Image (spheres, rainbow, N blue to C red):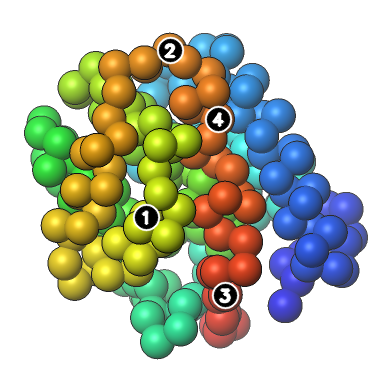
Amino acid sequence: MVLNNKFNITDSTELARLEEQISKKKAVKLFENKYLDSYTAGSFAMLSAIHKYLFNEIYEFARQVRTVNISKGNFRFAPVMYLQSAIEHVEAMPQSTFDEIVEKYVEMNIVHPFREGNGRSTRIWLNLILKKELSKVIDWSSVDKEDYLQAMERSPIKDIEIKHVLKQALTDKVNDREVYIKGIDYSYFYEGYMIFKAEEL
């Protein structure tokens, strides 16, 4: 299934390539400008602003909370009917330690508030929380792809693996653009891996 998009693209591979091209360019601008300065790190408002900035040129639904139930394999993300309360719960979670921050990140992944682009948006969101609270960020270029994907897949049940994977990649290079940009590399994190099913309400 190809999502409705502003370019009227009907081929999923073509859309994925365009998404990556545009979102990377927008991420660079987001890193260099002060667009997020008025938002609180860890808030859903910040996550929504990131999502809108990255995907507004591609999708009408950029920043909008999804109105469909989605699943990956046998795992269902938060149902639409509970989505708002789930978002509020995650937003209120503590974020003063590394463990708390990763737990908050895992929970937001389970919520999966947007129809598309959740992973890329939440990885930027995660680094901005880490930067504010710990003066650290994840160097995504040093994160093993398979270890990360498997740990994230298991994180709703047990988050010790993802904590270990991410802790090994912590760096104090909080102003390094390349460290930042790698987190939204669609092909690195998702190509050939994430297949979502959606149920229209």
Which secondary structure, mark 1?
helix
Which three-letter amino acid code belongs to the residue tagged 2?
Answer: Asn
Q: Residue at x 62, y 23 (%)?
A: 28
The three-letter amino acid code for the residue at tag 3 is Ile
Residue type pointed to by label 4: Ile
Q: Which residue is mark 3?
A: 195
Of pointers 2 and 4, the one earlier in the residue sequence: 2
Instruction: Work out whether mark 3 precedes mark 4 in sequence or the reverse, and give the earlier one.
Output: 4
Q: Say if 68 sits above or below 150 in the image.
A: below
Quarter holding residue 40: top left
**Residue found 78% across the figure and 67% down from its top:** 12
Q: Please provide percent x and percent y for residue 196.
A: 55, 75
| Numbered disc total | 4
When asked about the image quadrant of residue 82, the answer is: bottom left
Report x, y in % for residue 110. 33, 64
Q: Is residue 17 visible?
A: yes
Q: CA distance from mark 3 to mark 1?
A: 17 Å
Give the label on residue 17, or none: none
Q: CA distance from mark 2 to mark 4?
A: 11 Å
* Image position of 73 with respect to 94: above or below: below
Q: Which of disc 1 and disc 3 is earlier in sequence?
A: 1
Left or right, residue 121 beside residue 40: right
Q: Is residue 90 visible?
A: no
* Residue matched to label 2: 175
User: What residue sits 40% from the left and 37% below the top?
Assistant: 142
Label of residue 148 in the image = 1
Looking at marks 3 and 2 on the same chain, the residue that comes earlier in the sequence is marked by 2
As shown in the figure, which amino acid type bears the numbered disc 1?
Tyr
53 or 179: which is nearer to us? 179
Q: Which residue is mark 4?
A: 181
